[in-house]
Image (cartoon, rainbow, N blue to C red):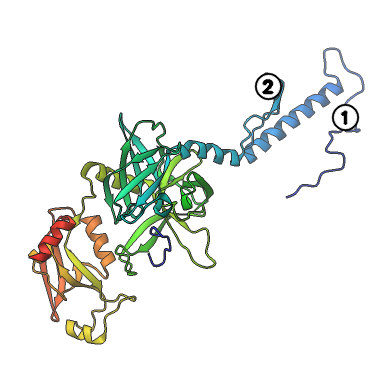
Amino acid sequence: MGLFDDDFYSTKVARPRGGMRLRRSKEEPHHWKAHARSGGWAPWKVSLLSSLCGAFVAVLLFSLFTGLPSSSPSSSSQGHLTTLGATDPYERISTAAAKVAPAVVSILNYNDDTVNAEQSALGSGVIFKKTKDKAYIITNTHVIADASNLEVITSDGSSHKVKVVGQDSINDIAVLEIDGKGIESVIDLGDSSKLRYGETVIAVGNPLGLGGTLTSGVVSYTNRLIPISLNQDGIYDWEQEVIQTSAAINEGNSGGALADLNGHLIGINTMKISDMGVEGLGFAIPVNDVMKTVDDLMLHGKVVRPYLGVYTLDLSNPYAGITREQREDLKLPAHVSDGVIVLEAHGPAKDAGLQLNDVIIQLDKQTIDSTKELRRYLYDNKKINEEMEVSFYRDGELRSTTVKLSDKPSDTEIAEEESK
């Protein structure tokens, strides 16, 4: 991915010596007479009552301000002393891991020339649904890319053949189906919109083939937008919203679970930043976004999006900028510095008259500076069969056309159209 080098996407408190001791004060109350009247309170009783009240108030205030339980150690039925309400954060991690790990699987991707597991590509997945005889797994699309033979290994070591239900390269999510026999664990889904900055999370997956590996960290950022290259050509043409975490995510963790301390799935691990001097920069797709994609894949086998039908190049792309001569050929006015150059037009775009070297600058009168913005507007604002006005420059002249958007055809259908 260029920037993302993942093979797949790639007070101490001083104590007095001898410990702390409670000592009774030597002072005597001097406003009370030494004798007690009949039916009245003896001075020692008043002193005792005052001490008890003071202690009670102190403990109560301590409890309120610290959040710690105010109850004192109590004896259990076995005679052992237990502290009520005590919570060990590391114990919570262990408890969450025990809940999550059985639902995380290892995925082996055998290519045509792969002869054994040691030479296969490795990834992870999460069982999120089970019917009577089938179980369904979420993973990343890049984990199963170019697969001719997939194998899933569950936490108990069982091997399962795999059917790909659907996959989406833009959101990098895929759904797999396996035989549900012997599958008992299904992960609980969380709510990624409720994540808090600094919240402790765990990552479970299959890094470097070490299945069931657990790492922990915090949520470093709840909704980071990072650029990605959909075509793996080094040109960033999309933005992915992700959860940033300090939990270690290594090669093979892709597709695995990012979970909270309740053992609920809050993200699918997808990538890391790998560079000299960089660590603790892992990313996961929020589960709320994941499940929107999963629902489409389960229903249609793909994510249904409106399709314009253009292959493009950004006019002001810093990584693949055009030369002065190429700009002169476009005959653009001097004030036009941003836009999207059409390299190929297919389907709706071709039908609407768009062609090579047209420079798109607006969609429905909204300024479009890059392919990333074009996709974002298309996917967030338009639907299949809707019309969209496209404003563009051709030979220095500003023009517009109306495009009727369609569903994206299959790669085979696109290839057939190109051959005509």
Amino acid found under the numbered disc labelled 2: Ser
Disc 2 residue crowd, few under 14, some 14–19, many 20+, Cα 10 Å: few
View extreme (top): residue = 38
* Left or right of residue 343, residue 124 in this image: right
The mark that comes first in sequence, 2 or 1, is: 1
* Left or right of residue 126, residue 413 in this image: left
Check whether the beta carbons of the residues at disc 2 and disc 1 lie within 8 A of each other.
Answer: no
Residue at 90 percent of width and 24 percent of height: 33
Q: Is residue 376 above or below residue 175?
A: below
Q: Nearer the viewer, residue 198 or 162?
A: 162
User: Does residue 113 appear in this view?
Assistant: yes
Quarter of the image where one finds residue 127: top left
The N terminus lies in which quarter of the figure?
A: bottom left
Q: Give the percent coordinates (x, y) of residue 118.
A: 43, 52
Give the SS element for disc 1: loop
Q: Which mark, by number, is residue 76?
A: 2
Q: Give the percent coordinates (x, y) of residue 142.
A: 34, 55
Residue at 34 percent of width and 49 percent of height: 289
Q: Give the percent coordinates (x, y) of residue 107.
A: 39, 47
User: Does residue 331 appear in this view?
Assistant: no
Give the SS element for disc 2: loop
Quarter of the image where one finds residue 349: bottom left
Residue at 70 percent of width and 24 percent of height: 74
* Left or right of residue 87, residue 150 in this image: left
Q: Which residue is the site of mark 1?
A: 31
Q: Is residue 122 above or below residue 309?
A: above
Residue at 67 percent of width and 33 percent of height: 60
The C terminus lies in which quarter of the figure?
A: bottom left
Q: How many marks?
A: 2
Q: CA distance from mark 2 to mark 1?
A: 44 Å
